[in-house]
Amino acid sequence: MSAVAENVQTEMPPAPIVFTDSAAAKVADLVAEEGNPDLKLRVFVQGGGCSGFQYGFTFDEIVNDDDTQMAKNGVTLLIDAMSLQYLAGAEIDYKEDLQGAQFVIKNPNATTTCGCGSSFSV
């Protein structure tokens, strides 16, 4: 009788992040306006805001070792490892409506959100 070693995964892989066509198109427009095709959209979570955490968006040319990269329609989205745990399963979208134009994150991990839409708690 021989023993067979099994590789048991102890953690579920994080749910994929959805980067919508609308968000990718807006990022492409903004990168074109900047005139620097090396720019990538970095989405991050940091402490603060009225609910404990808040989302941030910035452009970055540098890809760090712990970054998760997503490419869509010619643009790249970057998320650092710490932020990824809070954004797993989220949808990153761009909306234009009567309240204005903005990037919007629909996050299933957020237990409460603030009226501003950029602050949440888990």
Image (spheres, helix red, strand yellow):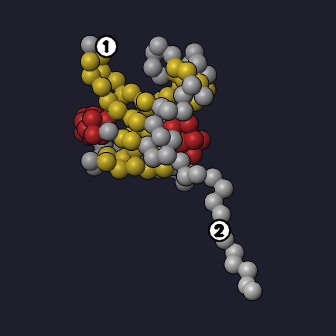
Residue, far bottom? 1
Amino acid on which the number 1 mark rests in the picture = Gln
- Which element carries disc 2, helix, strand or loop? loop
Disc number for residue 74: none
Q: Which residue is mark 2?
A: 7
Where residue 18 appears, x then y in whole percent?
39, 41
Q: Is residue 51 left or right of residue 23?
A: right
Q: If the image is split into quadrants, where does the N terminus sit?
A: bottom right
CA distance for labels 1 and 2: 51 Å
Q: Which residue is mark 1?
A: 99
- Which element carries disc 1, helix, strand or loop? loop
Where residue 94 appears, x then y in whole percent?
32, 30
Residue at horizontal 31 percent and vertical 35 percent from the top: 23
Residue at horizontal 60 percent and vertical 28 percent from the top: 122
Q: Along the line of sight, which residue is nearer the eye, 100 or 106?
A: 106
Q: Residues within 10 Å of mark 2 (few under 14, many from 20)?
A: few
Q: Is residue 43 left or right of residue 4?
A: left
Q: Along the line of sight, which residue is nearer the eye, 35 or 99?
A: 99
Q: Quadrant of residue 86?
A: top right
Where residue 112 appears, x then y in whole percent?
55, 21
